[in-house]
Image: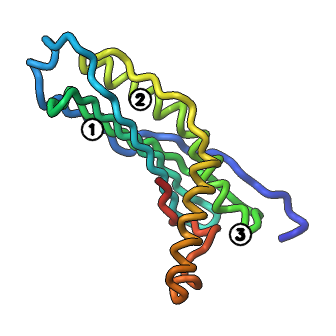
Amino acid sequence: MSDQQPIFSIEKLYVKDISLEVPGAPAVYLEREAPEVEIQLQTAAAKIDEGMYESTLTVTITAKRGETTYFLIEAAQAGIFQLRNVPETDIGPILGVACPNILFPYAREVISDIATRAGFPPVLLAPVNFEALFQQRMMEQQAAAEAQPDAAAQVSVASPETTLQ
């Protein structure tokens, strides 16, 4: 294995799931005040075959003004990535940082397009530091493992099935 070059490639990028709700229509279109927009990100990865992984970035946008929900958009942008001859310790960071960085521009475009098609101004997502989010998640897992000694053996930084939030 050490004499072979590491392989990291994008096999396929696709929208895995997409959802739009405008529960207050048509009244929300008459509102003059802009809603408050809340953004949630979640990443997940899973091994789907030998050397093949699916990485998914789910973006949820909720626009509300008081108790009135203007819209709710959820898009899961996914990709199939080939990882071969990569050290186990590097798989977690690749799936938790590199893959979401690749998926993010596509998810951002989908979210903006859905908002526009729903009759609202585009939602422009700012860049995200997936490395900081990954490190935060690893620290949370480590703290949880230290709090429960029996769980320490089950937590793995390189686990491709780790869900990051």
User: Which three-letter amino acid code belongs to the residue tagged 1?
Assistant: Ser
Q: Quadrant of the N terminus?
A: bottom right
Q: Which residue is found at the position 50% from the left and 32% from the top?
A: 106
Task: Count every numbered label the image shows and give the total.
Answer: 3
Dot 1: what SS?
Answer: strand
Q: Which residue is mark 1?
A: 19
> Compared with residue 163, is residue 9 higher up or lower down, i.e. above or below?
above
Q: Give residue 108's mark.
A: none
User: Which three-letter amino acid code belongs to the residue tagged 2?
Assistant: Val
- Label 2 vs 1, first from the N-terminus: 1
What is the C-alpha distance between the residues marked 3 and 1? 35 Å
In screen coordinates, is 1 left or right of 134?
right
Q: Which residue is mark 2?
A: 110
Q: Are marks 3 and 1 in contact (CB under 8 Å)?
A: no
**Mark 1 Cα shell of 10 Å, populated few (<14), some (14-19), many (≥20):** few
Residue 29 in view (yes/no): yes
